[in-house]
Image (tube, rainbow, N blue to C red):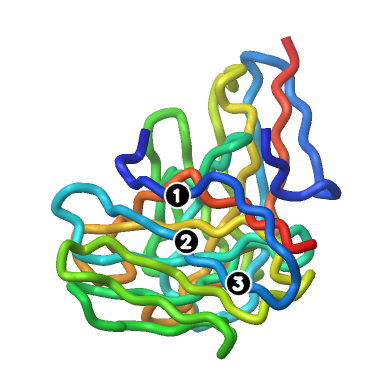
Amino acid sequence: GESVGLHLPTLSVQEGDNSIINCAYSNSASDYFIWYKQESGKGPQFIIDIRSNMDKRQGQRVTVLLNKTVKHLSLQIAATQPGDSAVYFCAENKGGQNFVFGPGTRLSVLP
Amino acid sequence: DSGVTQTPKHLITATGQRVTLRCSPRSGDLSVYWYQQSLDQGLQFLIQYYNGEERAKGNILERFSAQQFPDLHSELNLSSLELGDSALYFCASSVDQGARTEAFFGQGTRLTVV
């Protein structure tokens, strides 16, 4: 499949364990963030979003935490499954359609 | 399957040439976005169209242009191609033009400039 980045940081987790993927953003005024999942050979897929007036948002098996003090975003995946193997990256909205995307983290789920 | 169709899937061309990438949005979506994903720059927003009109511009080079047609499909034209233009080009679509509307991505066109 296509490789989105040969030198991405990699997180390896055992199937069934929880995964935590981190992202630092640059602009303290950014007010909207998205986490994307990109599987090999596919386009990015929206996972979950969060606005800056929240510090936590939960979806199905995923939770996003936002720490505005240190400009840090994390994505937690509960009970990680083989189908979760992908590259995950965050996007920071700097106004309008101006999204800045993080470099991504490759999640590898071990059997 | 996101419902967004991009053609071709792969394209190999020489420096100095011009290519056109095509995108058909999901049925009912009026907004189309183009992105470039390269190994060194990551994913970058290029341009957005909504119902045929340009709505937002990102890091799009002057050698690149796009348009959205009355049937809502979009084309991205890349000219005077350079080796550094080799990348994955994604199209995404959404039902409206707001930044907080979920966008659905196609599978991309892999452009290789040799």
**What percent of the width, then of the height, locates residue B67?**
33, 76
Q: Amino acid at mark 3?
A: Thr
Locate residue A68: give its quadrant: bottom right
**Residue, x 37% and y 56% (percent of image)?**
B23
Looking at the image, tell me whether mark 1 or mark 2 is earlier in sequence order.
1
Please tell me which residue lies in front, B79 or B54: B79
Q: Mark 2 and mark 1 in contact (Cβ < 8 Å)?
A: yes
Marking on residue B21: 2
Q: Chain of mark 3?
A: A
Locate the N terminus of chain B and report the quarter of the image it occupies: top left
Separation of disc 2 and disc 3 at Cα? 42 Å
- As drawn, the residue found furthest toward the top would be A111
> Of tags 2 and 3, which is closer to the observer?
2
Q: Are marks 3 and 1 on the same chain?
A: no
Q: Amino acid at mark 2?
A: Leu
Q: Chain of mark 1?
A: B
**What percent of the width, then of the height, locates residue A57?**
40, 48
Separation of disc 3 and disc 1 at Cα? 43 Å
> Of tags 3 and 1, which is closer to the observer?
1
**Residue, x 16% and y 62% (percent of image)?**
B71
Marking on residue A69: 3
Identify the element where label 1 is drawn.
strand
Please say if A63 is above or below B101.
above
Q: Mark 3 and mark 2 in contact (Cβ < 8 Å)?
A: no
- As drawn, the residue found furthest toward the bottom would be B62
Q: Are marks 2 and 3 on the same chain?
A: no
Identify the element where label 2 is drawn.
strand
Q: Amino acid at mark 1?
A: Thr
Please tell me which residue lies in front, A5 or A93: A5
Identify the element where label 3 is drawn.
loop
Q: As drawn, is A72 to the left or to the right of B55?
A: right
Locate the C terminus of chain B and report the quarter of the image it occupies: bottom right
